[in-house]
Amino acid sequence: AAEGPPGSRVETVSQKEVDALVGRVRQSCRTARRLHAAAALVAKIETLKPHEAQCWRELVCYGVGSFQSSPKARVQLAIAHVLLDGLSQSAPEGALRAVIFDPVFNEVEKRALAVLGWSVLDHDEEGKRPIAEPLVVASDDDPERSRSGCLAAGTVFFMPHCPFRLYSNVLWRNWGPELGSMVVVGNSFAAYDQRIISRSARKNPSNCVLRLASLTMEESFEFPPQDLDLLHQEGTGADVLGDSGVMWWREHHRIPMVQGVAETPKDEGGLADRDCGGSEASSVIVRSSQSRGRGSANRLRDSAEQSRGTLVLEPSTRPPEEFGVGHESLE
C-alpha cells in the first residue's frame, strides 16, 4: 500500500493484477456454466419472478469472500455470475442491476468486479436492503407489452454461507408484502428450523428466519454427481454451496406487518458478524446434521399443505436495539 492523505492508506493496484484476476474468474465462470446445478438454479429462479414482471430488477450478492485467494469464494462468485447471465436473458438492456458487497474485498477484487459488470456497494448495509423498486421498460419484441410497458421487479439475494443474522436482517427490512417479490439463495432455512433448539432464540423478535418458518417455501440446492469433477477442477467441492436452498414466499398476505419483529443491533464486525465459511455452530445451538433425515432438506417447503396456521407475532414493547441475532441472543 502507498501513502495517501493524512490518516489514510491507499492500496496500490496494478492493471496486470486486475486482468489476471478477471481471467481467473472468467475461467471459473466457464466451469460454472457446465454445472447442472447452476443451470437448474437459473431455471428455478426464473419461475419465481414477480407475476407482473418480465424480468428480475436486481441481483444482490452478499458474502462470497475473497475470491482472489479462495477457490471456494471464486466458484461462488462464478455461480452468481452465471445466475446473472441467465436472468439477463429475459431482461431488456439495463433492466437488471447486479450489486455485490463483502467487507473483505480488496481493491484488486473491487476493480475486477467492475470489469465483470458488478456494482460494488461502498458501505456495509448489514443486509438491510429494501426490495428494488419496479421499473417500467419498453419491449420491442412484444407489441402488447410495448403499449402497456413491462415491469422489471423484485430482488434475488444470493448469500452463500452468510451468518444467520444477515438472513434475518434481509427479512426484517422487507417484512410484509415485499417478501412476495424476493428470493433468497443461501443456507437452508428448513435446516435452521430443525437445528435451532434454544427456546429464547426461537422467540426472539429479531429472529425473522424462524418466525417465517411456517410460510417459507424452499427447494434444496444440490450438486449432482456429474458436477463434482468440475468442482474438483476448481479446487473445491460440493460444500461450496453445501446445505443451501432457494427460499421464497407466496402467502405474504398472511404475514403481519412490522409489529412483533425487531431490527438487529448495529453490527460491529462487518456483514452482520460474518462467519461465511458455512459453519453455523458458532452462532446457533444446533443438533447434529446427521440427526435429521436427508429427505427433509430436499422437500419443497409449503406451509399451506402443513396446516400450521397463520403466523401470529406478539407485539414487542422493547426497543429494537435490545434484540439481536448474534452470538449472545442465540446461546
Image (tube, rainbow, N blue to C red):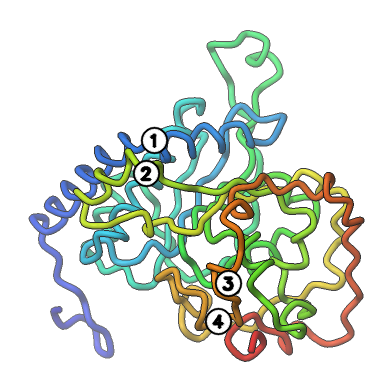
Q: Are marks 3 and 4 in contact (CB under 8 Å)?
A: yes
**Given this view, does label 2 or label 1 mark the residue nearer the observer?**
1
Residue 74 percent coordinates (x, y): 28, 56
Residue 144 percent coordinates (x, y): 67, 10
The three-letter code of the residue at mark 1 reads: His
Disc with the residue nearer the chain's start (3 vs 1): 1
**Given this view, does label 1 or label 4 mark the residue nearer the observer?**
1
Residue annotated with mark 3: 164
The three-letter code of the residue at mark 4 reads: Ser
Residue 241 percent coordinates (x, y): 42, 56
Q: Residue at x 64, y 89 (%)?
A: 331
Residue 164 percent coordinates (x, y): 58, 72
Quadrant of the frame with the N terminus: bottom left
Mark 1 to mark 4 CA distance (whole Å): 32 Å
Disc with the residue nearer the chain's start (3 vs 4): 3
Residue annotated with mark 1: 36
Residue annotated with mark 4: 283
Residue annotated with mark 2: 81
Q: Residue at x 55, y 74 (%)?
A: 288
Camera-nearest residue between 158 and 244: 244
Q: Quadrant of residue 289?
A: bottom right
Assess disc 2: are there few (<14), some (14-19) or many (≥20) residues with their C-alpha within 10 Å of its C-alpha.
Answer: many
The three-letter code of the residue at mark 2 reads: His
Q: Secondary structure at mark 1?
A: helix
